[in-house]
Amino acid sequence: MLAGAGSLLFGAGRAGHAAPPREAVPGWDALRASIDGDLVLKGAADYEARRGASLWNARKPKHQPEALVRVASVGDVRETVRHAHVRDLKIAVRGGGHSWWGAPLRQGGILLDLSALSQIQVDVPTRTALVGPAARSRDVAAALAPHGLSFPIGHCSSVAMGGFLLAGGLGWNGGTWGPGCASVQGIQVVTGEGKTLIADAEQNQDLLWAARGAGPGFFGVVTLFDLKLHPLPRNIRTTTFVYAFKDLDRAAAWLPECARSLRPEVELTCIIGTPPQGGAEKVVMVMATAFADSEEDAAKWLAPLETGPVESAVAVTRSEATPIDALHTAMDAAFPSGMRYGVEVFWTDAAPSDFVARIKEIVAAAPSPRSFFMFVISPPPREGGKLPDMALSMFGGAFLGIYGIWEDAAKDAENTGWVERMAKALEPIGVGHYVGETDLTASRDRAKQCFSPEAWKKLKTLREKYDPEKTFHSYPG
C-alpha cells in the first residue's frame, strides 16, 4: 500500500521537486519560500507560544530551537530536511507532543512539526491502513470501528501514532495483538539527506527494524505507517476491585496468582493512588479488561479476580461494558491535559510484594493527590510464542510506572523530588526501561538501558548508515 501513497494522502507540496544546489539555500527565507507550511523563527512574536504548544506536558524544558517548522505535506518534510542537511542544522521531530521529558524540544536546530500529517486511509478487504504520524489514537479507533477493525492504539486518546509506534507502542490488548510496532508492516521515511524511502518486508528491512521501537533516537522522519489491523472485539468489559490502602500488601501477594490465571485477552492493571472521583485516602485499584466477543466470555475470563480478597473490597464493578472510547475516557481522566508531569518507568522481574514494599511509604506521602504508582503484571505479548525481531527488545515480568501529576509550577521541586525518591527505591530491582516513557535525560546511559545489547549495537550501526552526518537529534546524554 505504501508505494506512491505519500502524494496521494498528503500531497507533494511545492517542495516536491528535486533538491536544489547547496549554494541555492542561503537562509531561512529560502526555506520559507519553498514550503507550503509555516516557519517561525526564534525571536518572533508568536515563537514562545508555538514552542510551548509543541509539548502536551505543561512542564517543559527551556530548550529553544532556532526554528519551528509546521509542515503541510511530505514535500515540506523533504525540503526542510534538505535545508537542515545543507546548513548542518539538527532536526527534532514532533508528532503529537506527548513525550514526558520533551523529546521534540532540543536546543538549536529545527523542530519539525508533523501535526498536519494526520490522515487515515483504511483498506477493509486487506485489513490494513495507511496512517499519518500525527493521527491520534481516538481518531484511528473511530476510523476502524465501523469496519469491525482495531489496532493496539495508545491508552490515552490524544497520543499520536508517530511517537507512539516508534517507541514500540505498548497499547490496548497487547496480550493478544502485541505492541503496536509489531503490526507495522511498512513505513515511508525521509532520510537525513532528504530522500524518501519505503521500508517493509521487501526493501530496507533494517530501517523498518529500527522504526519498530527506536523511539526518539530514530534517524529519519516517518511520514506514513502501513498498519496490519485486527478484528475489533465486540464485547470489551472491565472488572474493577478497589481496596483500602491498608490492604495493599494482601492484594500484592495475591495478584501474581491472579495474573497466571488470566487469558492473554485480559489486560491487568493495578493503580495505587487517590481515587479519581475524589477523596483524601489512597486506595488500591485492581482493573482487568477483557477484550472478548461476548458478554459470557468476558465474564468467564474475568472470573479469576473473584479469587482475591473480595470481602475486603471497598468498591466493586463487575464486567462493565467498556468499549474503546470508554477506556480512553477513563485513561484521559487519569492523565488530564494542562497538568505538569514527572514520570519514570521500569521493567522488573520482581514480585509485586517486593516492589510494593519498596515504595509503599513513599507513595502514601505523594505531595499531589493526582500522582500515582501503576504496575502491569502481564509481560508484553508473545503472539505465536515469539515477537518479531525489532528494536523494541527490553521487557520484564512487570511494567512499573511512577506518575507525578500537579498544577503549580512553584511545586515542581517537591513533586519531581517525589518521583526521584520513588525511582531510587525501585532501581535495585529494575531490569531496564521503556524508551517511550522513561526520562532519557536521567542518566547518560538511560537510552542504552532501553534495549538489549544486540539491539543497541545494531541501532548505532544503522544510524551511521542512514544518517552519517547526524542530521537528526539522537538520544540525549
Image (cartoon, rainbow, N blue to C red):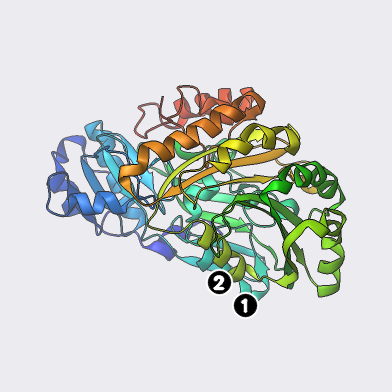
Total number of numbered labels?
2
241 is higher (above) or lower (below) than 21: below
Q: In the shown orientation, is residue 418 left or right of residue 90? A: right
Q: Identify the disc placed on residue 128.
A: none
Q: In the shown orientation, is residue 409 left or right of residue 305? A: left
Most extreme residue toward the bottom is 146
Q: Secondary structure at mark 2?
A: helix
Q: Secondary structure at mark 1?
A: helix
Amino acid type, label 2: Ala
Q: Nearer the viewer, residue 255 or 388?
A: 255
Q: Quadrant of the N terminus?
A: bottom right
Residue depicted at x 26% and y 34%: 89
Residue depicted at x 19% and y 47%: 31
How many angstroms separate mark 1 from mark 2 (CA)? 7 Å
Amino acid type, label 1: Pro
Q: Residue 277 in the image: state x and y as whole percent.
A: 55, 65
Q: Residue 267 in the image: state x and y as whole percent.
A: 72, 55
Residue position marked by numbered label 1 in the rendering = 146
Residue position marked by numbered label 2 in the rendering = 143
Q: Is residue 359 visible?
A: yes
Q: Are marks 1 and 2 in contact (CB under 8 Å)?
A: yes
Q: Residue 124 in the image: state x and y as whole percent.
A: 64, 71
Q: Nearer the viewer, residue 456 or 197?
A: 456
Q: Is residue 395 visible?
A: no
Q: Residue 122 in the image: state x and y as whole percent.
A: 57, 68
Q: In the shown orientation, is residue 359 left or right of residue 406? A: right
Q: Quadrant of the C terminus?
A: top left
